[in-house]
Amino acid sequence: MSTFSVIARREMRLAFRNRSVLITGFIFAIWFPVVSAFGIAAGAGEETVVLAGSIAAIILPIGVFMGYVFCADAFLREKRDGTIETLLCTPVSLRGLWEGKAAGVAVPAYLMTLISAAVTAATVSALTDAPVIAEPLLLFHLAAVVPVWVAASAGLIGAAQLALGMRENQILGFVFIFGFIFLIIALQEVAPGGPGLSVMTEAVLAAAGIALVALARFIAGKVTRERVVLTIP
Amino acid sequence: MNAVEVRGLSRSFDGRDILRDVSFTVGHGEIFGYLGPNGAGKTTTVRILLGLLAPGAGEARVLGRDLAVDDDARARVGVLFENNGLSDRMSAAGNLAYYAGLYGVEDPAERIDELLTLVDLADRRNDLVGTFSTGMKRKLGIARAILHRPEVVFLDEPSSGLDPGAQRMVRDLISELSRREEMTVFLNSHHLDEVQRICSSVAILAGGRIRAFDSVAHLTAASGRPVVTVALADPGESARAREEIARLPFVAGCEMNGEGLLCTLSDPGATPDLIAALVGANFRVEEVRRSSRSLEDIYLEHVAPAEGGA
């Protein structure tokens, strides 16, 4: 088994065993979308594509937030307790560690986001009788755009948590979340398809997500062992 | 080639010199004690050796390699920091299996069984590490550090948090690893007694400089004036014997302690003369023992002046 798989599987296992993170994730994944679903159902009429677009607009920031929630356990906890120093002495490169951890964080974060999407879609469908989950662009959004953005969120936040001190991380966590949300809204506005579900908007979002993953990988490659060690509290 | 080589190593943080021209070597299969007070720069040295920090000047090599850039060489080195590198939410065996995967250990199940038995945790193999005591975590941390059969292992205070029985187990384990597997052990410790018992050589670091670097035997023997402990058959006669001894020309000083009379000789070869003088004065001598200085004496001798004005 490759070291990437070893690290990713371990992070997934730990994420699924972390009760506090799972509870936080579940509350946010279910409470927020269900409340939003009532607003969507009331404001969007019964056009399926409009309803699906509203769901897509909510689910993407939730995916980003899930990436942040699960990152805290994988990257920040190991830095706080010093375990990262031992891991840096293994034959795995720092980028290799980051890749495994980011992937291991992204999978449960994505699954939690899918649960959120399913709950939201089911609630909206129940309230409007519109078969939103059968909307092809929403399925594409959930299957392609959301995982890329979850991975970008986990990767960027993870790289920042490796490179920054504890205090900076507390501040920058929220900056990242709001930065992502702002970026999503801005991309939807400037995309040729405009806000809502369209092929062009989804293509722009997918491309931007891939660019963010590449940016995260580039940043992780620039972080040095020394930087990580000197920011251990 | 030595297992560990440090030459002219310097490093500063925020304009403060932490290490200044530090040099020492550790031979293969040696157990080396790296001593110094808190803040002396021990951890910085180890971090530079492990490639976690860059040196400001000089060089640090382990097995002839720079671990900062050589991933393969890191696979030949083990490390135990103050933090054991374990996850509380994984079992003992799960933690070891994770590191076995990172190091590419062959037949990991057999090796994990062997090590859990060695550190007396075989019956807790499936328990979460979060339920372990500090000592049990330490023992598992040591097992983790040697899991991949490293050629050099860095141990930072390996017996901290352990009860006396477990401390002895750790000492025996370190000695056994060095002897049986020819593993080089780099030991960071404040337990001077432990270091004196198991280390073949030591370096004392204080104020960022190496104050002493030699074999333990040579350091403790090179004490200048020899000290001899004399025990009389009748301890009640000690005060009178002390007066007698103090008059002898080859005795620089004599004090009473719990073991008898502690005599500092000005002539290294005068022990037989001391015995003859006591017998001649009709004292019944029970035991005469040549004392060497402890590592603690030497440590304090080097560290105290450095702490005062390094």
Image (cartoon, coloured by chain):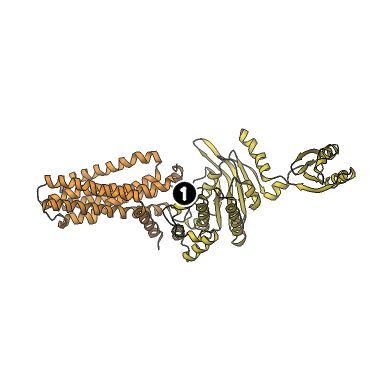
Chain colours: A orange, B yellow
Horizontally, residue B83 falls left or right of residue A209, namely right
The answer to which of A113 and B113 lies nearer the viewer is: B113
The answer to which of B280 and B302 lies nearer the viewer is: B280
The answer to which of B239 and B34 lies nearer the viewer is: B239
Question: Outermost residue toward the right?
Answer: B280
Q: Position of residue A36 (x, y in %)?
A: 18, 45
Question: Outermost residue toward the left?
Answer: A46
Q: Quadrant of the N terminus of chain A?
A: bottom left
Horizontally, residue A9 falls left or right of residue B60, namely left
Question: Quick one: SS at disc 1?
Answer: helix
Q: Residue at x 37, y 48 (%)?
A: A73
Task: Quickly name the residue at label 1.
Answer: A85
Horizontally, residue B15 falls left or right of residue A41, namely right
Question: Outermost residue toward the top?
Answer: B309
Residue A155 visible from this viewpoint? no
The answer to which of A146 and B290 lies nearer the viewer is: B290
Q: Which amino acid lies under the numbered mark 1 shown in the image of this protein?
A: Glu
Q: Position of residue B185 (x, y in %)?
A: 58, 54
